[in-house]
Image (spheres, helix red, strand yellow):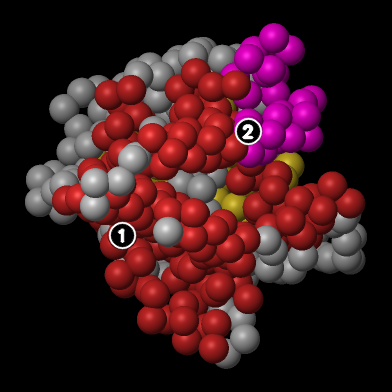
Amino acid sequence: MPGFFDRIISILFLVLFSYQAVYIFASFFLKEREDSYEFRYHDLAVLICARNEENVIADLLASIRSQTYPKEHVHTFVMADNCDDLTAHIAEENGATVYERRDPEHVGKGYALEELMSRIGREYGEAFDAYIVIDADNLLKEDFLEQMNRSYCKGNRIIAGYICAKNYDDNWISAGYSLFLLHKNRFLNNARYLLGLNCAINGTGFLFDRKLIRQWDYHTLTEDIELSVDQACRHHRIAYCREAVVYDEQPVSLRQSFYQRVRWAKGYLQVIGKYTPSLLKGIKEGDFSCYDMLNTILSAYGMSVFCVALKAVTLLSLLCLGRDIAPYLYSILVGLLKAYMMVYLSGLMTVLAEWRRIDVSAYHKILYTFTYPLFLATYVPIAVYALFAKVTWVPIRHGIRSSNESSC
C-alpha cells in the first residue's frame, strides 16, 4: 500500500509538471523575436514603499539618479510607511518626493502602494505613463529604466524585471534565495515570455501601465503573486525583460528567512482561496496561462503539505496495524535522496545556464548548489506551520549599503 501511494504521488507530479520540460527547452533554444516598434521616452514614476530603511534608501536613490534614462522623464516617490527612523528625511535629502503614512491596522506593502498611487493621482493627475515598483533595499543596473522603457515601447503593459541578489555568497541561506530567483528568471519567466505566455511578478522591479491599473487593490501577504494571478484571470499578459536587472538583498539568518517565508506561504493560501474559481474558469475557456498560474500557486504550497500529510498518515497506519515500519522508513529515505538529487541538478543547471551573470567565485557557485536542496526543504515545515499560524506582515531589516555589492 505505501508503494501504491508513492506511485500516485509520482504520477501526480509528472502530470502537473511535465510541461515545464518545454520551458527548459525554450529557455535554451528560443530567441526573442525582434519586432519593429516606435521608440520614445515615456514619463515614468518610480514607486518605493519603505519601512525603516534608513540603512539602504540612499543607495537605491543614488542608483536611480545614475540611470542612463533622461532625468526629465523620471520622478521618484517614496512612501515612508509607519517609519520611526530617518527614512523620510534621507529620501528627501536624496531628491525623492516623500509621503508619510501612519496606519497600524492596515500594514503591508499593498496598503502603502495603494495610498501612494492615490496621492500621486490626486497631485499629478495623468502626468505619468507608467509606474515602476522598486523595494527600498534594491539597487538598479544603470540601464534598468532604459530597458524597461524599450519593452514598454514594444507594447508590453506589465513587465517583470530580472531579479538577482546583492549578496549571493553571504551564506547558504542568501545563496538559496538567489538560486531560487535565478531559476524563476531563466526557466520560468524567460521561457514563458519566449512562448508568448503570462509571466509572474517577483515582488520588485516591475512596471505597469497607469491606465491598466489605476488603483492598487492587492492586499494579501503576497501582493506580487496576487497581481500576477489577477492579471492572468483578466487575460492581461505580463511580459518579461531579461535585460532590466534589479539587485535585491536576501535574508542571511534563519529567523529572518522563517518570518518572510511564513508570510509567503500564508499569502499563497490567501491567493489560492481568492482566485482558484477564476483560474478554473480561465482554464475552462482554454487559457493555458491560468493553468500555469494555478499550478504555480498550488505547487508552491499544496504539494509539499500533501506529501508530508500522506507520509505521516501512512506511517501512523502501519504503526496502528502493528506492521514493520523499517521498510517504509527506508523508502522515505530513498525518496528524500532522489528529491535531493533532482533539486541539486535543477540548481546546477541554473548555475551553469546563468554562470556569466553570477558575479561570485566559481567555488561558491558550485558549493551552494549542494546546499540549495536543503534550503528548499526548509519550505516544507514552514508551509505546514502556515496552515495553522496567524501571520502578519513583519518587516525585514536590511543593511547592505555598498552600491557596488551585487552578485549577478
Membership of 345 in magenta stretch: yes
Q: Which residues are magenta?
A: 341-369
Task: Please name the residue shown 89% across and 60% down the image.
Answer: 34
Q: Position of residue 130 (x, y in %)?
A: 55, 60
Question: Residue at position x 46%, y 47% from top?
Answer: 203
Q: Which residue is mark 1?
A: 269
**Where is residue 243 drawn, in percent x and y?**
73, 42
Q: Amino acid at mark 1?
A: Leu
Say which residue appears at 77% left-offset and 65% top-offset: 195
- Mark nearest the camera among 2 and 1 is 2
Does the segment drawn in magenta span residue 362? yes
Quarter of the picture holding the C terminus: top right
Task: Work out which quarter of the rendered image holds the N terminus and state it.
Answer: bottom left
* Res. 359 image quadrant: top right
Q: Which mark is residue 90?
A: none
- Residue 328 location (% of width, % of height): 41, 42
Would residue 116 be found to the left or right of residue 146 on screen?
left
Q: Which residue is mark 2?
A: 341
